[in-house]
């Protein structure tokens, strides 16, 4: 974490200063919004709503932030928690974009050729389960260690590793027809 | 799958989602300002409520009978200072209530500011 960022956090905690918190929002908005966009399967409006909620929660609870991890991982943990809460609240809504994991798995096998003609990792992400989407994004896109991810998602290290492995295997399965297409 | 494909996949995964800085920061800061104002209002109301409750409890719990007897003993001493132009003494109990009310109004005024 940069020294200037530490100063902003200190100023935001001690003075509840919105100016310095604004700098933190500016610094981390791309990461938080990008992460939530992956989690919400590309739903920009919902991702931005959850991101706003994340920053508001962070502002309210900034005094509870401890220097044990980075500020970014603290924000991402709040974002993940907000996302889970959103799913739970809307789990009975059939029009929600987040069907149950079994449904997602079924969809993967049925529509595995949906992205046949286009190598697009963002589209491929749509077919993954939520924990796979989360772990792969945090691990590869944001370069976080497995232990950091386990803290963010509040799950054991072994589970994180298996989600990453399963996610990668699922992506390979999804992207495999593309490879065959290129070879033909 | 070959090892090269693994590397390719990992390289693809390293790409971050495309996010434009489209005034999101301003929206968040506006929301935070609204939240702060609401929080401030709520805190002010709770504080005022506490003052009012404390004042009522004070009025109820004060041993007025004992206090008035005790004050009557010293009434004559203070009549010299509190007597009005007509010569009627200003009851010390009213003076105390006036003092408490003006003090409370002063505190309320401070909090409102």
Image (spheres, rainbow, N blue to C red):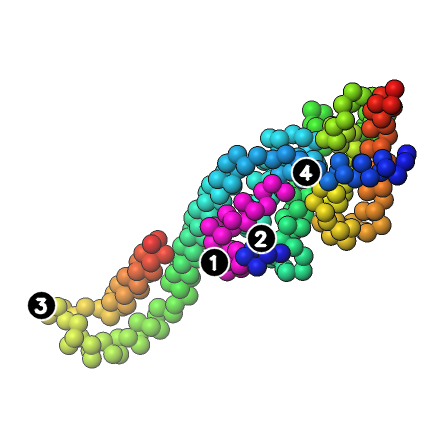
Name the chain letter of the residue that bears numbered label 2: A
Do the residues at pointers 2 and 4 share their chain? no
Q: Are marks 2 and 3 in contact (CB under 8 Å)?
A: no
Residue A15's tag is 1
Residue at 47% from the left image edge and 50% from the top image edge: A18
Q: Is residue B39 above or below residue B61?
A: above
Name the chain letter of the residue that bears numbered label 1: A
Residue at 69% from the left image edge and 24% from the top image edge: A95
Residue corresponding to mark 2: A61
Mark earlier in primary sequence (3, 4): 4
- Check the picture and name the quadrant holding the C terminus of chain A: top right
Q: Nearer the viewer, residue B87 or A148?
A: A148
Name the chain letter of the residue that bears numbered label 4: B
State the CA–CA distance, disc 2 to disc 3.
62 Å
Which image quadrant is residue A125 in?
top right
Residue B53 belongs to the span the image colors magenta: no
Question: In the drawing, does residue B112 fall left or right of residue A159?
Answer: left
The boundaries of the magenta stretch are A6-31
Q: Secondary structure at mark 3?
A: loop
Q: Are marks 4 and 1 in contact (CB under 8 Å)?
A: no
Residue B85's tag is 3
- Is label 2 or label 4 in front? 4
- Check the picture and name the quadrant holding the N terminus of chain A: bottom right
Question: In the drawing, does residue B68 fall left or right of residue A138?
Answer: left
Q: Nearer the viewer, residue A108 or B8?
A: B8
Which image quadrant is residue A169 in?
top right
State the CA–CA distance, disc 3 to disc 4.
86 Å
Residue at 38% from the left image edge and 69% from the top image edge: B63
Mark earlier in primary sequence (2, 1): 1
């Amino acid at each position: 974490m940069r020294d200037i960022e530490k100063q902003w956090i200190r100023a935001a905690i001690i003075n509840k200063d919105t100016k310095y918190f604004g700098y933190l929002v500016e610094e981390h908005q791309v990461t938080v919004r990008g992460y939530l966009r992956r989690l919400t399967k590309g739903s920009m409006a919902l991702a931005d709503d959850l991101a706003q909620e994340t920053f508001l929660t962070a502002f309210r609870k900034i005094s509870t932030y401890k220097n044990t991890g980075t500020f970014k991982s603290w924000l991402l943990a709040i974002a993940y928690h907000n996302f889970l809460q959103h799913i739970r609240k809307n789990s009975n809504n059939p029009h929600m974009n987040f069907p149950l994991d079994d449904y997602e798995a079924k969809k993967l096998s049925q529509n595995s050729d949906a992205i046949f003609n286009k190598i697009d990792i963002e589209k491929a992400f749509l077919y993954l389960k939520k924990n796979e989407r989360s772990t792969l994004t945090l691990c590869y896109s944001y370069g976080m260690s497995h232990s950091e991810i386990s803290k963010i998602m509040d799950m054991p290290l072994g589970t994180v590793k298996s989600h990453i492995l399963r996610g990668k295997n699922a992506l390979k399965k999804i992207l495999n027809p593309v490879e065959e297409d290129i070879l033909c | 799958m070959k090892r090269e494909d693994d590397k390719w996949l990992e390289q693809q995964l390293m790409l971050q989602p495309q996010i434009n800085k489209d005034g999101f920061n301003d929206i968040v800061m506006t929301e935070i300002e609204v939240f702060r104002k609401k929080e401030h209002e709520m805190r002010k109301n709770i504080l005022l409520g506490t003052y009012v409750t404390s004042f009522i409890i004070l009025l109820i719990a004060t041993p007025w009978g004992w206090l008035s007897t005790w004050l009557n003993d010293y009434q004559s001493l203070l009549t010299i200072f509190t007597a009005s132009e007509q010569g009627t003494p200003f009851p010390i109990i009213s003076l105390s209530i006036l003092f408490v009310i003006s003090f409370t109004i002063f505190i309320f005024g401070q909090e409102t500011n």
